[in-house]
Amino acid sequence: MTTGETIKKRVWLTFGSRRMVETPALWRMARKFPDVSFDIRQASVTAEIGIMAVLLEGPQPQVQAAMAFLQEQGVTVEPIEKSVVEG
Amino acid sequence: MAYIIGLRCRECGKEYPQKGVHVCEVCFGPLEVQYDYTRMKGKVTRESIERGPRSLWRYRDLLPINGEPRAGLYSGYTPLRRAHHLEKILNVRELYIKDDSANYPTWSYKERVVSVAITKALELGYHTVGCASTGNLANSVAAHAAVAGMKAFVMIPHDLEQGKVLGSLIFGPTMVRIQGNYDDVNRLCSEIADKYKWAIVNVNLRPFYTEGAKTFGYEIAEQLGWKFPQHTVCPTAGGTILPKIHKAYQELIDLGLVENTAPKIYSAQAAGCNPVVEAIRAGRDLIKPQKPKTIAKSIAIGNPADGFYVVQAVRQSGGWAMDATDPEIIDAIKLLARAEGIWTEPAGGTTLAATIKLIESGRIPRDESICVCITGNGLKTTEVVADQLAMPTSIPPKLEAFDAFIAELDNTGGTRELEPLTT
């Protein structure tokens, strides 16, 4: 049962350590939030760091909960623009 | 004459017309302005540039506008100063300061990017501009929007100091204090840019906005007599200016306006927020996000939007990167003020401190020309040095009291502290 307006979120996911690179965080997210689709548009992964440009799509509450879940897992989740607040 | 063709994704190459978009819809890569360089050859010359106004718009043929400039008519073309006193102090042969602390009207390099962004916003039919900023960018957007007759929205963190708010508020924008931590503010501003059809200068107008930073590089070369310094040291925050100085140098070479002397470019960051320096030192392309902790607030961006391209530009040029601690930054601010009469903000202190460390470590040879990029004015960040400077002595209004004060100075060696340096 899904509720809420369908939204799309373009985000950068950063897996900032070897431990995070070896953590299947996206798989866990997909299992926990089956109504949220993820579409990887760009990725670069090494042993020490991984960065992915991902489109998340689904009901708004689930997309937001999925993003929060990824952050709890240790993934840095940022808007595709990264830092827009400049000095 | 306009030479802009359109926009192109830096990653996958997909092309876009000129409009308010900043990332590729396919791969989410950043978009870059494309020009017809073939048509420029022979038409964009040293002479054509020198005939232009004494502002950043003397390089208008190399900027992404189709019509007349509409903002920043008096911005740019800031001093490139030979720093004789610093040369002596640092024991180097040839040192220059490119001084955007004197950039009109709000005293930072942001005039360059905002002037281009607002001109482009008007061309594209926008009536409202905006930004999210804690300082220089907000000041510049508010001032240039006022001159252009545009509405301006400035988003700021709720706990920003009053002094920083006033520097923008005076120009009459709508300012919104956003509650939450940095990440909350950042996320909301991205959503605002997505939902409201405004020209958010450093978001949906980013491809055009960043092109304005090239003028910093053109000016260095032109003011040096159409040649490059061998070493250019530049601060890195969001990563806008350094890759654009690199692009400016490359364009001047490709157009045959300046001989290719293989100029090296260096990134300077505060040690409390050094994601680019850290990546370059580690030999990585990818930037690990950081939580900033430094007095250099104007360059404290933990995950720079264009950090990857800073790394690329530094590597391609053969340069390097260096960070500076907060005490080193403060010392460098004071040194620049006392040696050259320039009061810069912590970003400038960072750049000079990093330059000194690059010289001392042998990365920059002492007998080659060096340009230090100063991007902002210290009058906006007085709190940084307020407790570093002793309050002046207070004396009664009597000549004998002044005589006693001078005698005391002589005894303590105070009058010799700042002996003039001969050049």
Image (spheres, coloured by chain):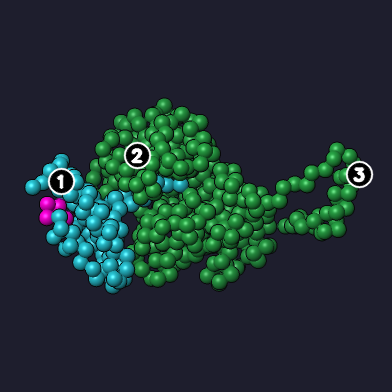
Give x and y (percent) for residue B235: 48, 56
Query: From this viewpoint, which residue is outermost toward the right?
Result: B400
Badge 3 is on which residue? B400
Q: Secondary structure at mark 1?
A: strand
In the rendered structure, the colour chosen for chain A is: cyan
User: Residue under mark 1: which chain is it in?
Assistant: A
User: Could you say which disc has been placed on residue B200 in the image?
Assistant: 2
Q: What separation in Å lies between label 3 and label 1 (alpha carbons)? A: 81 Å
Badge 1 is on which residue? A59
Give x and y (percent) for residue A13: 27, 58
Of the residues shown, which amino acid type is indicated by label 1? Pro
When the figure is inspected, residue B272 is found, relative to residue B240, above or below; the finding is: below
Residue neighbourhood size for the residue with mark 3, other residues' Cα within 10 Å, grouped as few (<14), some (14–19), many (≥20): few
Of the residues shown, which amino acid type is indicated by label 2? Ile
In the image, the chain rendered in green is: B
Query: From this viewpoint, which residue is outermost toward the left?
Result: A1
